[in-house]
Amino acid sequence: MSSAADAQGLLERLASTKPNNTQIRAIAKEHGKNAEVAAHLWNSGGFSARMLSYLMLELKAVDAPYIGRLLSDIEAVADAREQSQLLDWLIANVIMKKAALKAETAEWISGPSAVRQRVYWSVQARSIQAENHDHNERLLQHIERELPSAGPLQWNMNWCAAQIGIADERLRARCIALGERLGLYRDYPVSKGCTSPFLPIWIGAVVGKQARAE
């Protein structure tokens, strides 16, 4: 069976079942890696198909121009929630799994593309380590300066500040103070069992949990 036919079969399955993220992962595991099928799924433009395509990509064939094409398509997605989920899965399932792709995002801290800047801050948040103190310091200085007016980047920058405060004890008080000063997400509605994105609560909750686990 051709890659196009395989992809069409998957598209029909997705359309009939409307799978959630867990089910999409199960479908990907069932079918394995296939770059050509992944490309057909992505080009279909469907949300679930694109989420599935990430999991079927062969990472050795994914380079910076490939990621650039995906990001251009994501920038054109009108639904903000779908755009965010597509970005999250691209980062978690593709970019973070290949060092060369992570390195590519290091220059995306500024520029005309808000989507690329969101990727930058998300990659940084996922990569924070206590021993990288000087790098954490530079990131926090930028966040302290830009977070109040960061607009669509606020969520990602706030997440990065939380990870710095959690990982780097020497910068923790500054991250907490930043949250107190700005009050960002202080009254954010949180479902039962979830942690508030308000920096003092977020950092305190995770650090406290880590201390209890030791």
Image (tube, rainbow, N blue to C red):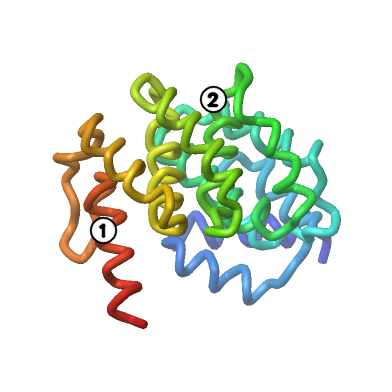
Q: Amino acid at mark 1?
A: Gly
**Whole-percent x, y for residue 56 in the image:** 69, 62
| Residue 176 appears in the figure | yes
- Residue where numbered disc 2 is placed: 114
Q: Residue at x 54, y 62 (%)?
A: 13
Q: Nearer the viewer, residue 205 or 114?
A: 205
Q: Residue at x 41, y 33 (%)?
A: 80
The secondary structure type at the circle numbered 2 is helix
- Residue where numbered disc 1 is placed: 204
Q: Amino acid at mark 2?
A: Ala
Crowding at label 2, few (<14), some or many (≥20) Cα neighbours within 10 Å? some
Q: Nearer the viewer, residue 134 or 24?
A: 134
**Whole-percent x, y for residue 20 in the image:** 42, 61
Crowding at label 1, few (<14), some or many (≥20) Cα neighbours within 10 Å? some
**Whole-percent x, y for residue 186 in the image:** 18, 40
Of marks 2 and 1, the one in the foreground = 1
Question: In the shown orientation, is residue 80 left or right of residue 177?
Answer: right
Q: Quadrant of the C terminus?
A: bottom left
The secondary structure type at the circle numbered 1 is helix
